[in-house]
Image: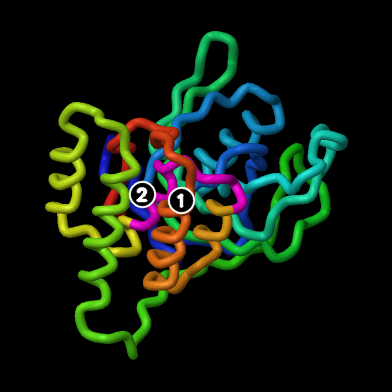
Amino acid sequence: MSDESLSFSPDGFSGVARVFPLPNLVMFPHVMQAMHIFEPRYRAMLEEAVEDDRLIALGLLAPGWEQEYEGRPTLRSMACLCRVATHQRTPEGTYNVLLLGVRRLRLVRELPPKKMFRVIESEILEDIVPADAAVGTADRLQKELLAAFKRAMPKIPDAYEQLDQLLGTQITLGMLADIVSYTIDLSLDWKLRLLTECDVFRRAELLLEAIEGRPAAGPQRTFPPDFSLN
C-alpha cells in the first residue's frame, strides 16, 4: 500500500460526495474498513472513484430504510469520507476494497439522480480543540480513555501491549477517540453521536460515558483495528 494511496488533502475535495449508504456501520476517520462491493450501482461508484479522486463517503441509513432500499432511503446527516486505499476486481466482476476514513462529513443536499449511485453536496468538518481548556486536559482524557478501554476489552493475549504500542506512536486524543469509537461495541446511535461531535474533548468525554454505561461485552472488532495517522 503506497503513501499516495493513503494521502488526502481537504483542498482536493470538491464538496460533492459519492455516498455508499449502509444499514449497520458507522465509519470513523483514522481506521480502515474492508468491504466487498457487488451491487452494480456501487461497482459503478467505485470505478468512478478510482478514476477520479478515490473518495467515497460511507453513510448510515435512517430507521425504516428496509421499505425502500432499492430506491433512495433517508440517510443520517453525518458520514465519513473515505479514500480507496486498495481495490481488487474478482473474476465475477465484484470488488474487494479497503477504505481509509479521512474526515467527518456533513451531508447537506442530495443531487438529482443522474447516476446509478447517490451523490450529495457535503462539507468537511475538522476536529476542534478548545483553546480555553485547562492545561493538561488532553493528557488526562487520553489516560482516562485508555484505562476505560482496557477495562472494557476482553482478555486478549498481548492486546494491552499492542494498545500501549499504539499510543507510543503519539497519536492525538481525537485519533484515539475515533479508533476506540470504531472498535468498541456500542449502539449505532452512540457511534453516530460520537461521529457528529467535532469538539475533541467533548467527544472523549462522551466516549468515556458510553464505555462506562455499556453492558459488559468485548469489542465488536479485533484489536488493534487497521488504522492510519493520516
For the point 50% across and 38% down, the residue is: 50
Neighbor class of circle 2 (other Cα within 10 Å; few <14, some 14-19, many 20+) is many
In the image, 28: left or right of 31?
right
In the image, 84: left or right of 119?
left
Name the dominant secondary structure of the magenta segment: helix
The foreground one among 72 and 214 is 214
Residue type highlighted by circle 2:
Ile
The foreground one among 228 and 10 is 228
User: Residue 131, relative to residue 5: is it above or below?
Assistant: below
Tell me where residue 42 appears, x and y as whole percent.
65, 33
Tell me where residue 74 appears, x and y as whole percent.
79, 50
Looking at the rendering, which quadrant does residue 129 occupy? bottom left
Does the magenta portion include 186?
yes
For the point 39% across and 34% down, the residue is: 218
| Separation of residues labelled 2 and 1 (CA atoms) | 7 Å
For the point 57% across and 34% down, the residue is: 47
Question: Residue placed farthest to the right in the image?
Answer: 67
Numbered badge on residue 179: 2
Start-end of magenta stretch: 177-189
Asked which secondary structure carries label 2, the reply is helix
Asked which secondary structure carries label 1, the reply is loop
Residue position for label 1 = 28
